[in-house]
Structures are given as C-alpha cells and as structure tokens.
Image (tube, grey):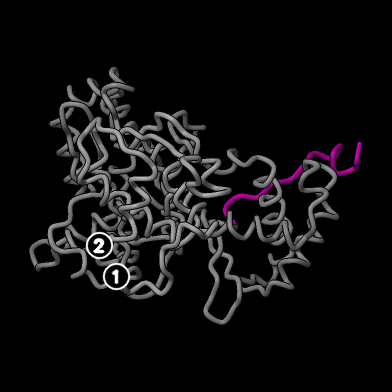
Amino acid sequence: MKRDEELLRAIHLLLENRWILKRDMPEEFYLIRQRERELRKFFLDKLDWPLVGRSRYYRLERIPAVPQPFMGIEGLTSVQDYILLCLVLAFLEDQEEEGQFLLSELLTELPALFPEEYEERLDWNSYTWRKAIVRVISVLAELKVLEIVEDRSGAFLTKGLVDGGGEALYRVTEVAQVFLRFFPRAMSSYEDAAAFCAGELREGPQEAARARQVRINRRLLLEPAYVRESGTAEADFAYLLGRRSDTVERFAESVGLTLELYEDAAMLVSIDQPDWYRDYFPVRLKGLHEVLLHLADILRRETLAAPKAYYTETDMLQAIARTRAARGKGWTKEYRDMSDKRLWGLLCREMEDWQMLRLTTDGLFELLPPFWRLVGDYGEEIKDGK
C-alpha cells in the first residue's frame, strides 16, 4: 500500500513541535486542519494522546509512559527553576490574552504564590533567584508562551530593580494559559511523576491489553531506547518480544521509522538521516559523539571475550585514556585538550540522555545495550597521524 506522505508529514509536525501556531506556521496549520480527523484517531488509538485544536493553534499532548530525566525542559537547570515556572504560569492565568505586564509586577506577585512548605524562601535580593527567574522567562519566550516587548533585565540580574532600572515589558500570547496539559483530577492526588503518566490509562480487564500496547508505543516513540527492565516493564517487554511485535512494526511504519528488536532492548530508528528530527545520534554533537563512538569501539574490542556491563569511575577514566591514545589524534581540538575527568563528565551526561548508561544504587556505571549498538573508527591515515 502506498504511504500517505501528507499524513506522515502532519504526524511528524505534531511530534516535533510543541505548538503549531497559525501565525507562525500557516501552511502547516492548515495541513493539520485538513487531516485533523485522521490525526486524532491515529494518536488516540496508538498512543492515547489527545490532539488539542483551537482557531489559532494545534498541540499534541505527548504523555510519556515512564518519566525520564532527559524529558525535562532544556534551559531549566534546578528545582527552583521549575517552581518559578509553575508560579509564572499561575500568574499568567489571571492575565488577558495579548495583554502586557511589567517584570516588577510579576516579581511582586510571585512571593504570594510561593509554596510555604518549600525550605528556601523566594528572595529577589538573592542573585541565584534573580538568575532563575530570568532563565525561566527566557525559556517561556522561546516556547512562545510570552513575548518580550522591551527588555532591560540584564541590569535586574546584576543589581535588582533599583530606581526603575532593570525593568522589562512582556506580552501574553494565545497559548499562555494552556501550556500545562489538562489533568482529570487534582494534581495533589497523584502520588508521583509516574502517576501523572499512568493516570489516564485504565487498567480494567477489558482494556489491559490496549493499555499495554499504548505504554510500549509511547516508550518506543519518546525514548531513545526501550531497555528491558524488571517489574511491569519486564512483562511489557516480554509481550513485545512475543506475538505482538508485528503490531509495533505496523506502528513504526506509520510514523516512518523502523523497529529494531533485540533480546534486551528495542528502538525505533531511521535508516536514512531524517529531515524532521531536531535531535538525533550521532550527528548533532558531532565532536563529542565521535569520542563516544570511539569509546564504544575500544570497550567492545576489549570485552568481546569477557563481556562486562558494570564499571567504576576509575574504569571509565582509564578507558577514556586508552581511547585517547588510540584515536585522539583525530578528535577536535576541544576534546584533544580536555582532561579525561571533564570529558567523562560530558560523555556521562550524553550517554544518560541517550539511555546508553545508568548509574546504579551502589555507584557503578551500567553500560546499557544501546551503547554497544554503534561503534566508530577512523581510516588508517588518521590513526597513523598522517
């Protein structure tokens, strides 16, 4: 059957963009409007994700099966950042669409909204808190929740609001009040982050099979790799390995990807370099990803006879030193000059984000199946230093 390229493009747009705003993406907006019925059915049937459509935007509520650290908002770096994010969103709920407000007004309102149970109090005299609110506003502007009309917040960051200096003016956009997704019950009633994700999936006898398929589809689509684990995830993975793998293959084809299924890991991959992914391996961070591929190659060669999954930090630093000696001549200057310890810090974070590594409770580093899937080497000319 011939693939519907127009529908596939609409699926990709919704998967890769938080918003499809009519004012910014009119062609894409009308494409989704034309195929809206099919898109709603596809995302509800396969992933139990609602497609929210209004006169000026579309948004796909992409709910994960399991919350992962890499799913945080890029640009926010601390718990304080996320607290302030929620407070600003609460402030925006009382603002009119397209209305404007001053930074000083926001700073005055937020302390009253601040949770009393939090151990540290909100204090704009603190550079840490000032830097956090500037960071949050920058992220919200990037996400198009608000627009910066006039900005002198650089002075606020260094000195605070002194004699009117450091003031800024913002405009409320059409999506400011719907940034957070709708929850069917009070957020305080959820036990943890996982409950937010599982809450909508009913687990009654008649719907258990569908709930399991939805969980699997969500993990495959939102996570770099679905690694076999214990508990509920083990049962789901066994189900995937069994007679239902063909169902997942059909799902993969419908989003333009290919299912790779192994005994201990599964992933959706693109055989050709995609033109719609913003973040993919091993191209985005070319220099660091080259080092990672070389490290994987060295360790794979060393452990062919005796496979090893768990490493100490000392083990990894020594492995990086060996990799540097064998392949370092071809690295970019940044990584050639970097210390082994700092380089391991960068690699460790990147490997965690791509689910290639997991830190165990006893402080060991577990190298997961996706780490061993790709390796890299240079031609003889580079290895010989020519």
What residue do we see at 86% from left, 37% from top? Answer: 381
Residue 201 appears in the picture as rendered: yes
Determine which residue is flagged by label 1. 192
Residue 2 appears in the picture as rendered: no
Q: Residues within 10 Å of mark 1 (few under 14, many from 20)?
A: few
Kindly give the residue lying farthest to the front in the view shown: 163
Residue 248, compared with residue 193, is above or below; it is above
Determine which residue is flagged by label 2. 196
SS assignment for the magenta stretch, majority: loop
Q: Is residue 261 left or right of residue 29?
A: right
Quarter residue 56 falls in = top left
Pick whichever, 53 or 355, lies toward us: 53
Q: Is residue 380 magenta?
A: yes
Q: At label 1, which amino acid type do we have?
A: Asp
Quarter residue 231 falls in = bottom left
Segment tinted magenta in the rendering: 372-386
Decide: marks 1, 2 in contact (CB < 8 A)?
A: yes
Quarter residue 139 falls in = top left
What residue do we see at 41% from left, 53% from top? Answer: 223
